[in-house]
C-alpha cells in the first residue's frame, strides 16, 4: 500500500487519520513537535489499531530533522497537517504564524523534492473562501482570508499550485475542511487542546464535564434561522477517511486539486448546544456574547467534488458527533 509520512500526526485530526491509514493497510511515519499535542496519542493509535507507529519528535522547520526522516524511511506520500491553527492567536502573532506554517511547508517540500517524493495531501481550510463568496462554497471560487491563519492556508495552496505548474511530477490535493468535531468511537483519541479551547465542541465538552463554567455564544443577530452562526460540522473520523481517499486519488493524478470535505449541511451554534445537551443528558450553561471580529454568518460546503473524485461523502450524524465527543470527554476529563 505504501508508506505515508503524517506531519502533525499526534494532533486531533492527524491522530484520527493515522488510525484510518493503518486500518486501510498503509504503514505510517509520524512527525510532530508536540507543541499542541501529546505523545500519548501515538500510544493510543497503536492501542486502537494493534500496529506500531514510527514516531519522530521533530519540527518541520528543522531541515536536518526532516531530512533524517526521509533518509531513514522510504516515504511514498506525505499528509501535511502540521501547523499553528488558532485564528485569534494568529491575529496577535502574525509573524509566528507565517514563519511556522509557510516556512515549515517550504522545508518539507524542499526535502520531498530532494528525495523524489512528489505526492502530498495538504490540510487546508474553508477559511480560504474569505468573507465575500456566497454559500455553499465551491472549489473554483476565488480565495482570500480574514486573518493570518487563513492567509497561511491561501498562500500554501498558491505555492502548491505553482509547484505543480513548474513540475508536472507533483501530485497535490488540498483538502478544505469545514468544522471537524467528534472523536474516535473507542473514546481513546479526540480533541485535546492545550489550555482554553478555541473551537466550539471541546469548549462545550469542557462545560459539560464541569471544567469550564459556561459557553459564550458569539452573536445571536446574524441572518440565520436562529441568529447564531451556521457552520458545516463534520465528524473527524469521516474527515480522516477522506484523507485516505485523497492519497489514493493523488497517487494516480498529477497536478493541483482543491477538494472540500464537509457534509454540505449548515448547523447553528444553538442547534449544536442542544444536540450536545441531548448527548450528555443535562442542560448546558451558555450566554450570548458580542460577535467576534472576522466571523461570518454562514459557512458550509458544496461537497459534490469529493463524492465525484474521491468517492467519499460524510456518513456520521450530528447525534453521533456529539455522542462520540461526550464519550471522549467523560473518559478523558483532564485530556490525554
Image (cartoon, grey):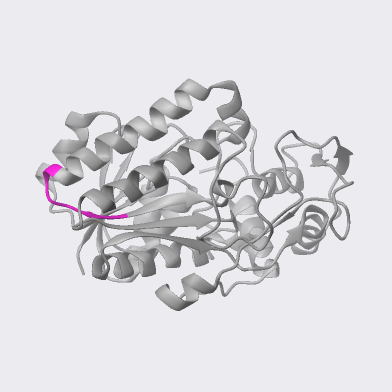
Q: Nearer the viewer, residue 35 or 163?
A: 163
Query: Quick check: 162 above or below 235?
Result: above
Residue drawn at the location 65% of the way across and 33% of the way down = 196
Please determine whether, in this image, residue 161 is positioned above or below residue 212. Answer: below
User: In terms of depth relative to the viewer, which is nearer, 170 or 326?
Assistant: 170
Can residue 37 be seen here? The reply is: no
Q: Where residue 110 appears, x then y in whole percent?
A: 20, 38
Q: Is residue 116 magenta?
A: yes
Q: Position of residue 70 (x, y in %)?
A: 15, 44
Q: Quadrant of residue 212?
A: top right
User: Seen in the image, is 164 located left or right of residue 139?
Assistant: left
Q: Position of residue 14 (x, y in %)?
A: 42, 51
Query: What segment is highlighted magenta in the picture?
Result: 114-120
Residue 320 in view (yes/no): yes
**Quadrant position of residue 230:** bottom right
Q: x and y percent of residue 332 in the render?
A: 58, 48
167 left or right, relative to 223: left
Residue at the spot 47% in from the left edge and 28% down from the top edge: 97
Queried whether the magenta region covers residue 125, the answer comes back as no
Name the one closer to the observer, 146 or 33.
146
The quarter of the rendered structure image containing the N terminus is bottom left
For the image, the number of numbered tags is: 0
Amino acid at each position: 500500500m505504501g508508506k505515508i509520512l503524517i506531519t502533525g500526526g499526534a494532533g486531533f485530526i492527524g491522530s484520527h487519520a493515522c488510525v484510518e491509514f493503518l486500518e486501510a493497510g498503509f504503514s505510517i511515519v509520524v512527525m510532530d513537535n508536540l507543541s499542541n499535542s501529546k505523545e500519548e496519542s501515538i500510544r493510543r493509535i497503536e492501542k486502537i489499531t494493534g500496529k506500531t507507529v514510527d514516531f519522530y519528535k521533530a519540527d518541520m522547520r528543522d531541515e536536518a530533522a526532516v531530512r533524517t526522516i526521509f533518509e531513514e524511511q522510504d516515504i511514498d506520500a506525505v499528509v501535511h497537517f502540521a501547523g499553528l491553527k488558532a485564528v485569534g492567536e494568529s491575529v496577535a502573532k502574525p509573524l509566528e504564524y507565517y514563519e511556522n506554517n509557510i516556512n515549515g511547508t517550504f522545508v518539507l517540500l524542499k526535502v520531498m523534492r530532494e528525495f523524489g517524493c512528489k505526492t502530498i495531501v495538504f490540510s487546508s481550510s474553508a477559511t480560504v473562501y474569505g468573507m465575500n463568496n456566497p454559500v455553499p462554497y465551491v472549489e473554483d471560487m476565488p480565495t482570500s482570508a480574514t486573518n493570518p491563519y487563513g492567509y497561511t492556508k491561501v498562500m500554501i495552496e498558491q505555492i502548491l499550485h505553482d509547484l505543480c505548474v513548474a513540475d508536472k511530477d507533483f501530485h497535490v490535493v488540498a483538502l478544505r475542511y469545514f468544522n471537524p468535531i467528534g472523536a474516535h468511537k473507542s473514546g481513546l483519541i479526540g480533541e485535546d487542546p492545550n489550555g482554553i479551547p478555541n473551537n466550539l465542541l471541546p469548549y462545550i465538552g469542557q462545560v459539560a464535564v464541569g471544567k469550564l463554567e459556561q459557553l459564550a455564544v458569539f452573536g445571536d443577530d446574524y441572518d440565520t434561522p436562529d441568529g447564531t452562526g451556521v457552520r458545516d460540522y463534520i465528524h473527524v473520523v469521516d474527515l480522516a477517511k477522506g484523507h485516505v481517499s485523497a492519497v489514493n486519488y493523488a497517487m494516480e493524478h498529477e497536478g493541483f486539486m482543491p477538494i472540500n470535505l464537509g457534509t454540505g449541511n449548515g448547523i447553528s451554534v444553538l442547534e449544536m448546544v442542544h444536540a450536545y445537551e441531548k448527548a450528555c443528558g443535562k442542560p448546558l450553561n451558555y450566554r450570548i456574547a458580542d460577535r467576534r471580529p472576522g466571523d461570518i454568518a454562514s459557512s458550509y460546503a458544496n461537497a459534490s467534488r469529493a463524492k465525484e473524485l474521491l468517492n467519499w461523502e460524510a456518513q456520521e450524524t450530528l447525534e453521533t458527533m456529539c455522542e462520540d465527543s461526550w464519550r471522549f470527554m467523560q473518559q478523558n476529563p483532564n485530556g490525554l
